[in-house]
Amino acid sequence: MRKINTIVVLSVCLLFLVVSTASAAWAFGEIRYPDRPLNLRKGRSARTAWVGSLTPGQKVRVSFLKDGWVAVFEPDETRNSESAAVGYSNAKYLLKKQTRVEPKAWGELVYPWRTLNVRTTPSVRGKKVKTLKAMEHVKIDFPEDNWTMVFSPGATIRSEMNAIGYSSSKYFKPATRSSMAKAGLGSKPKVAEERVSAPIVVSEAVSVGSGQGQVGGAVVPPPVSVPVKSSGPWGKVLTLKKKVNIRKARTSGSRYVRTLKPGEKVRVDFLKNGWYAVFRENELIRKESRALGYALQSLVEGGKEASVSVVEKKAVSVAVPVAVPVATSVPAAPVKVASSPTKTSGSGRKTMVIDRSKFSNTKRVDPTPDKTAHGYQYRIIEKSETKQLGETWITIKVFLATKKLPSTNALKDFSTTVWRENKRINKKVAILVFLPGMDLEDLSFGVTKFDDEKMLEFWVRKATLFGTEFL
């Protein structure tokens, strides 16, 4: 009997030890939430390489605090080791409570149509780290030429350090409902939004007129709210203590609308994801579409709440904007341009002849390319970051080594690849493409502009090729 009791006690102790060990494995570090779009770095410094980004309110696990920086992990990570980290971030921007939530989907859910190796580098010479089975679903991102990074389908953090490895992108097919059903993944891909702990209210899609509800070129449904003529106060009237930027939508990356000055009184309501809809103080109708825009709750509530007076039922005068005459600049005097020799054809048309001998001694030495993308050899010759009208721009000058003038689509694809390798959250990128024989200190041939999600503008200047072998 004593032997049985001893065995029972030992079994209970062993079970307690196993449970405690498992709990300890799950409990390492802390759960935190970024209070803004946040870059992930390869090391504990802003000077180290960028590897990914976090969105405001995204749930992550952090640990190993040192020099004000923490290692960032997937929220359900159990390996208490820095080797499992997906990057490093400044600890002061990672809060214990969510202040706002701005989820953003990333990557693409795909599957290989045959067995496929995942390697340590984007090359067949890279060491094999895993073999994907046919129809095994994974997430891909960070394309590089004909290769792409491969992630677990449940990965929530977009970071190069979170990837399994590289695979050739030509062997993947986009996931479909039927392929996911066969793989046991359900009918919807698991994207980053589904992993955010705070509930996200998604309004039903509604049709909108041309230009209505556009943010950065994308049409979105207008806020759904019921107009209510208030016979009494609604929302809160606040006196601002600091400058507050008003945005078109509830994200810091949306279009800037205006800046409110300290001392101004505003009415706020419709709090969602840490953002208020901001109205004029004397607004009578509680309708979200009548708002000036949106502002962060933490900035708006930094002011003192004013006493709310009862709103009288009377007509509201509407301020009509007055057109102000704008002084036009005086047209510059015409510039005389030295004309080239001309020839007159039999039809009477005049043809300008370019004397190429004048450019024979002005040939510049072209840079040596050191990278390849889309069949082109190229070199990044300059990369800079500037502020333009309150927006941060990354400008990249690229030399493209080619003997044939690239087509519009080829130049767009090439520029998009360079952008994906260098894009940063909430920063815009301008890709300036130079061809052989061009002056690298002058205007570029191709210009492509991006925000952190898509291409904004594209054009080419054929006149810049004057004096090169292309013109």
Image: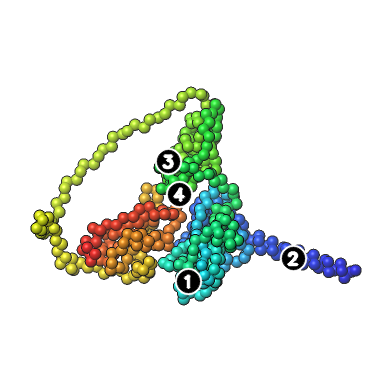
Dot 3 corresponds to which residue? 209
Q: Secondary structure at mark 1?
A: loop
Q: Nearer the viewer, mark 3 or mark 1?
A: 3
Q: Position of residue 443 (x, y in %)?
A: 27, 58
Q: Is residue 425 left or right of residue 444?
A: right
Tell me, for residue 253, which label it has, or none. 4
Q: Is residue 147 left or right of residue 179?
A: left
Q: CA distance from mark 3 to mark 1?
A: 47 Å
Q: How many marks?
A: 4
Q: Nearer the viewer, mark 2 or mark 1?
A: 1
Q: CA distance from mark 1 to mark 4?
A: 33 Å
Q: Nearer the viewer, mark 2 or mark 4?
A: 4
Q: CA distance from mark 2 to mark 3?
A: 63 Å
Compare marks 2 and 3 and give the one earlier in the sequence: 2
Dot 1 corresponds to which residue? 121
**Does the image show residue 275?**
yes
Q: Secondary structure at mark 4?
A: loop
Q: CA distance from mark 3 to mark 4?
A: 23 Å
Question: As shown in the figure, which amino acid type bears the numbered disc 4?
Answer: Gly
